[in-house]
Image (cartoon, helix red, strand yellow):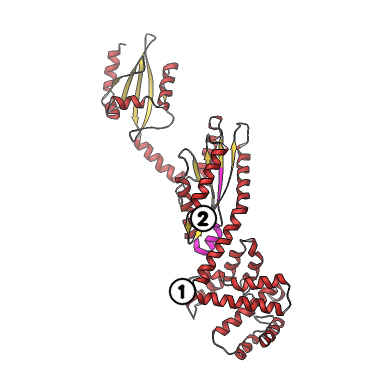
Amino acid sequence: MKLEVYKDIVLSIKEGLVFLDENLKVSILNEKGKEIFKTDQSAFEFFKREEIKRLVEKAFNKKKDQSNKNPIIFNKNYYDLNICPVISNKNFLGLIIIFKNINQRVKKYEETKELNYVDDLTKVYNRRYYEEQLKELNQKEYLPLTIIMIDVNNLKIINDVFKHKAGDKVLINISKIIKKNISSKYIFSRIGGDEFSILMPKTNEIEALNVISNLKKQISNKQINNIKLTCSFGFETKNNIKQNINKIIETAEDYMYKDKFIESENHKKEIIKVILNELYYKKIKNKKHSIEVSKICENFAEFLDLKEKQVYNLKVAGLLHDIGKIAINKNILKKEELTESEKTELKRHSEIGYNILKQSKEYYEIAEIVGSHHEYYDGSGYPKKLKKEEILIEARILSIVDEYFNLKTKKYKINKIKELLLSESNKKFDSNLLKNFIEFLEVK
């Protein structure tokens, strides 16, 4: 068949079509092809692209049809390419390249991908996509393959104190920061509630360390509810195809948890400081109450000749005993008369305080005291309905001192306060400790 005949075929086809001659130079474009390329320079630059050169050379060398695996993007449009060698009487005449516009197909694919592969909250890839890409990248051509594991520090305590909207805000902001500060060739995914991963093909250890260093810096510059954001990072690199990818992930996770051990503890202390500032230092009444309770707890503990550690714990517990109120509706805290549902909500503060403080090793013993300072001696208290010696002695003391100051705030005279306290002997309060406290009041 003569070349002129091919020219007629090229010009008659409705799809975009280009004919490359035996020297692989653009020889003929049909009308649709001219719409795609617009200028000769545009066509020249297109065929210089590595992915296109590979396909063309493969079709030329093997003299077999070739097509692209992934959509070809050109001038903001998506195309499938079919490259067909033209051979007549065993003579190679050139290549016909058909451009099929697949914009609608890609759009539908992206919509489906959005539903199947994107996390609803953070709008980054989800675990399903991460697992599929992990299989895809676990090939020799992508080595060295580095995997970074990321854990958002103290998301639970942020959720407990500032509600889940604040926690969601933390996750969204961290996702945006990471996505903005890594290469588009990396796969960034949310793989759990507070866990993320970055798959980094053709990336060595030094490059990964630089990425982590920059991400830590960028994340620490962001605050939510006056709390500086922090994440823990761990990574490992697969340099040899024989290395087990699951072992690589396990090692990355181990390094992440080691980093978390250091980062998280410091962050917890910072969060507790923020809560105290919010609850006490912005509200002088709360601050005064807690300082007075703390001081009396300390003095009463010394009066009882308790151990030095117990004295210290009571002093701190007195200062922090109402920390859980940070998560209680402010309108409830302001009201004098509460409904039953509001009373139930207010009672949550001791358990919330326990959950906040137990996050930090420094406050773990304090958490136990704070969490049970509304347990009553007869078992009618909350949240666990503990009774008698099931309740820590420090919590039994704090309960008496807290009630003393509540009565004092109501302007009762000291004799009336003693009378009201004694009326709860062996009910709310340990009778022996209560007797000691009355003696303490008389000598202080």
Q: Residue at x 66, y 82 (%)?
A: 427
Does residue 277 belong to the magenta stretch? Answer: no
**Rendering coords of residue 344 (x, y %):** 54, 73
To which residue does mark 2 refer? 229
Q: Residue at x 70, y 71 (%)?
A: 310
Q: Nearer the viewer, residue 216 or 325?
A: 216
Label 2 packing within 10 angstroms: few (<14), some (14-19), many (20+): many
Q: For residue 327, say whether it is visible.
A: no
Look at the picture and state if 438 lies above or below 284.
Answer: below
Left or right of residue 125, residue 424 in this image = right
Which circle's residue, 2 or 1, is located before the other in the chain?
2
Instruction: Kindly identify which numbered label has been placed on residue 262.
Output: none
Q: Residue at x 40, y 21 (%)?
A: 56
Look at the picture and state if 356 lies above or below 386.
Answer: above
To which residue does mark 1 refer? 331
**Quarter of image, res 55:** top left
Q: Amino acid at mark 1?
A: Asn
**Quarter of image, res 22:** top left
**Rendering coords of residue 382 (x, y %):** 61, 73
Regarding mark 2 in the picture, which secondary structure is present there? Answer: loop
The single residue placed furthest to the top in the displayed view is 89
Q: Nearer the viewer, residue 126 or 419?
A: 419
Q: Which residues are magenta?
A: 148-164
Left or right of residue 435, residue 269 in this image = left
Look at the picture and state if 395 lies above or below 128.
Answer: below
